[in-house]
Amino acid sequence: MMNNFINPIIELAVILPGLLLTYLPMKHHLHISKAKLAVFSVLTSILLCVIGGSLCYFFKIGTIWVTIPILVITAISYQYTLKITPWKSISVLLAVCGSFSCINGVARAIDALLCPDNLSLWFGLEAGLIYNILCWMSVIISWYPATHAACDLLEYDSIAQTWYLFWILPTVFFALNLFMIPIIPGILYQGRILQIYIVVSLILLALLMLFYALFYLIAKSLNKNNRLKQENQFLSMQQTQYETLCSAIEETRQARHDMRHHFSTIATLTKRRDWQELEYYLAQAQEAIPDIELNLCDNPAVDAVIGHYAVLYKINDIPFSTEFDLPHKLPITEMELCLVLSNLLENALEASICTKPKKRHIRAQAYLHSNNIVLLTVENTFDGVIEEKNGILQSTKRRGNGIGVQSVRRIAEKNGGYCNIIWKNNVFCANILLRGEQN
């Protein structure tokens, strides 16, 4: 009798390794400390197992009927403890559920082999323990891929749309394993059904792992292509800024060459006291002076990004002021700084285009706060309303979270920096602290 009471609790105890596996890729996205998270997860898992197992025992129902509401409660708690979009967190949770459902099928076949007389709705004690051991083994085997490959996958912003479809794969495998559960346990012993059941369960598990690997490789390839595209874009910005600089140098050289002739003409008109002609000549000479304003800093990559957007702002008649005091060699990765800067300047451009011309203004500044910290501020005016949901800014171009702002926040918080975004009186201000990696 006591075994019958413990069996559903042991079967549901796989919640603990499952929950651990879901948190392994989330080391950069935790909303609470690891100590609080560990206590919360363990206590919640034990409580859900005991309550769920007790309901199964007293109401004589299979564990699947309490597993589904437990998954809903776990998903809500899981999202509450993370600083990440629900699409990614739920996809990770479903990925673990899909894997464990395949292991459940294997454990069900083992239960049929070890306990042929077990006609209850739950695994026997031996099969339940083996089920938990297999789940813990899967956690150990998946530890490195989860903390590296899966963790990197969550950092990819270029494949944000892919997360809207990924959940379908583990859901389908979960439904298949659910469909394979025999309504009458004794049917497994008829003919070769048990052997077929074991083979199909193993094949489903292998296929799911293969699909996960393929998804990772495809996502990695997409991210690599996106990074190459960004690098090419930055190179194009540098080329444009270089050509602009060369043009400015050439025009300045020509202006200096012509200056001697201008002084000679001005001196002649002054001696003649021909003030009207002198005024006319000065007006013409002033128009001939190159009207090129270059806001440069010592770092060529950042200089290229500033120059690129300065041209766009000038074309769209948007006042732009900058103050960049950055050295040639930065304590942080140039690519990450350029990504943050281009995202913020691009958002400022889009907001300013939708703002009345008289109200437009963009200000950007960046400087070294110490040998290891870069402080960056981008401020712009805007018209309209900024929407925020669960602490995440919403996109103005489509429904959903703003990917650009999320990318900025992720890069900023990567090495212990921060991203502070405020808006008040139609002024949007992003204050970013980027910290270099410690040697």
Image (tube, helix red, strand yellow):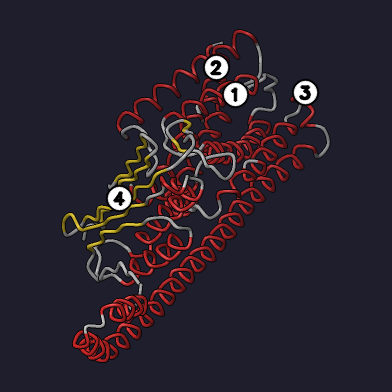
Instruction: Verify CB contact (< 8 Å) between mark 1 and mark 2.
Output: yes
**Which label was assigned to residue 67?**
1
Mark 3 → mark 2, Cα distance in angstroms? 22 Å
Q: Which mark is residue 184?
A: 3
Q: Nearer the viewer, residue 228 or 430?
A: 430
- The mark lying in front, picked from 3 and 4, is 4
Q: Residue furthest top?
A: 58
Q: Which residue is located at x 58 percent, y 45 percent?
A: 163
Label 2: how many residues lie within 10 Å, few (<14), some (14-19) or many (20+)? many
Tell me where residue 247 sits by quadrant: bottom left
Q: Amino acid at mark 1?
A: Thr
Q: Is residue 346 left or right of residue 421?
A: right
Residue placed most toward the observer, 372 or 215: 372
- Near mark 1 (Cα within 10 A), the count class, few <14, some 14-19 or many ≥20, is some
Residue at the (81%, 40%) spot, across then down: 192
Q: Earlier in the sequence, mark 3 or mark 1?
A: 1
Closer mark to the observer between disc 3 and disc 2: 2
What residue did someone put label 4 on? 377
Mark in front: 4 vs 1: 4
Judging depth in this view, the residue of 439 and 263 nearest the camera is 263
Image quadrant holding the C terminus, namely: bottom left
Q: Are marks 3 and 4 in contact (CB under 8 Å)?
A: no
Mark 1 vs 2, N-terminal side: 2
Give the alpha-carbon distance from disc 3 to disc 4, as whole Å: 66 Å
